[in-house]
Image (cartoon, rainbow, N blue to C red):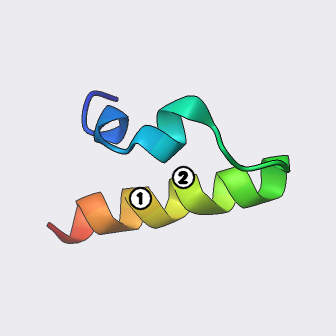
Amino acid sequence: MSRLKQFRRLVTRYDRTASSYLGFVHFICALLWLR
C-alpha cells in the first residue's frame, strides 16, 4: 500500500466514477509490477 501512496491522484481520488478510479488502480498496479 505504501507504494500506491506515491501516486497523489490515487490517494486523493480525483476520478469521478468508481470504474475510472478502479481502472487507474489497475494501471498503477501494473506499473509497479513491471518495475
Q: Secondary structure at mark 2?
A: helix
Q: Which residue is mark 1?
A: 28
Q: Secondary structure at mark 1?
A: helix
Q: Residue at x 25, y 38 (%)?
A: 3
Between the C-alphas of marks 2 and 1, the distance is 5 Å
- Along the line of sight, the residue nearer the viewer: 13 or 33: 13
- Along the line of sight, the residue nearer the viewer: 16 or 34: 16
Q: Does residue 20 appear to the left or right of 1 in the view shown?
A: right
Q: Does residue 16 appear to the left or right of 13 in the view shown?
A: right
Residue 1 location (% of width, % of height): 34, 29
The image's mark for residue 8 is none
Q: Looking at this rendering, what residue extends furthest in the bottom direction?
A: 34
Q: Amino acid at mark 2?
A: Val
Number of numbered callouts drawn: 2
Residue 9 location (% of width, % of height): 50, 45
Q: Looking at this rendering, what residue extends furthest in the left direction?
A: 35
Q: Residue at x 85, y 50 (%)?
A: 17
32 lies above or below 15: below
How crowded pointer 1 is (Cα within 10 Å; few <14, some 14-19, many 20+) is rated as: some
Asked whether disc 2 touches disc 1, contact meaning CB atoms under 8 Å apart, the reply is yes
Q: Amino acid at mark 1?
A: Ile
How crowded pointer 2 is (Cα within 10 Å; few <14, some 14-19, many 20+) is rated as: some
Residue 35 location (% of width, % of height): 14, 66
Q: Which residue is mark 2?
A: 25
Q: Residue at x 54, y 52 (%)?
A: 25
Q: Residue at x 56, y 31 (%)?
A: 12
32 lies above or below 2: below
Q: Does residue 3 appear to the left or right of 4 in the view shown?
A: left
